[in-house]
Image: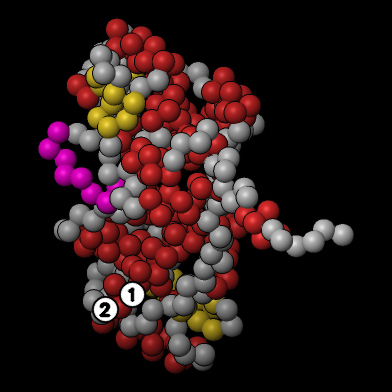
Amino acid sequence: MSGVKPYTVQRLRGGFALVWHEGGKRHRRQLDSGERVNAEAEARRLWESADDTPWTIGRIVEGYISHLSKSDPPSLQRRKDAWKAMQSFWGNVDPTMVDDEMCINYRDHRPVADSTVRYELLLLSTALNWAKGKKHILARPSIWLPEKDAYRIRYLERDDFEKFYDAVKSPHARLYVLLGVYTIARPTAILELEWSRVDFERRQIDLNPIGRRQTVKRRPIVPINSELHEALAGAFVARQSEYVIERGGEPIRSIKKAFQAASERSGIKATPYTLRHTGAVWAAEAGVSMAALAQLMGHDDDRTTQKHYARFSPGYLKDVGDKIAKGRRMR
């Protein structure tokens, strides 16, 4: 904001707000003064003392993400994707206008799980903390959050998997589905897989690219079963690039649209991560040990695997009830 830009003082929520237009968009900032004369004076002071660009939520979050980019944390891309989804709602909002009602309206506006909304609002809260620390804003508004749900494993029963798989139409997406459920790999590892790491003779896939240092999210060497071997062999003959999941010679950066379309056609909701959980549950149900499953999933500690998948094992706590009752006389 600068002195040459027009602004008005308008009624808002029983008080007054400074209102201006910039870049073809309308901006508002709540004023503290409750009387028209005092509000006009406050608006004039704010206008004359402010810099050329208001610190909207959009500017704050983008500034925060730019700040994070310097260290390139593993979660950076997820935060960028979250902001992309949030931007149309929050981009032009003045931080002083943020309150519980606005956060709840955002939750109602987003057709996604509360856990996703919670993550997005936590991103907003963290960005506002950063802005206050940098003195871009005077105060950080309170951010309402949906309650944190207990973690639930979402997986597909075999009949639902077949319905979903039948609804997947494109060859690259069908191959992705088989890789997802049979290798139990993380979505990014599948999309980054190159043919040079597919060993048809040994029937193995090395999920970790050459030169990539292993992190806590390890990418192991995984086996190729008969169905996946046949699908990979067919795709290898028709390949147009070095990437296993590709279309027209170009690597696929996101498989989400194909999953959304298949979910709508089949009535079975599934995401790329649903396949990872599905493969893990099926393996546990088949009696695969938690230690072996942890290796396959790239878990450094099999306690994580135990926590989420042990209950699906056929022998899980099977004889505990009988042991508790042992020695008690039956009536």
Identity of the residue drawn at 21% across and 62% down: 67
Name the residue carrying label 1.
129
Name the residue carrying label 2.
133
Give the magenta-colored segment's residue range.
210-217
The local secondary structure at tag 1 comes to: helix
Q: Position of residue 94 (x, y in %)?
A: 41, 70
Q: Most prominent secondary structure in the magenta stretch?
A: loop
Splitting the image into 4 quarters, where does residue 247 fall?
Answer: top left
Cβ–Cβ under 8 Å for marks 2 and 1: yes
Residue, far left: 211
Q: Is residue 285 visible?
A: yes
Identity of the residue drawn at 60% across and 28% down: 158
Q: Amino acid at mark 1?
A: Asn
Question: Which quarter of the rendered picture does the C terminus lie within?
Answer: bottom right
Question: Which quarter of the rendered picture does the N terminus lie within?
Answer: bottom left
Q: Amino acid at mark 2?
A: Gly
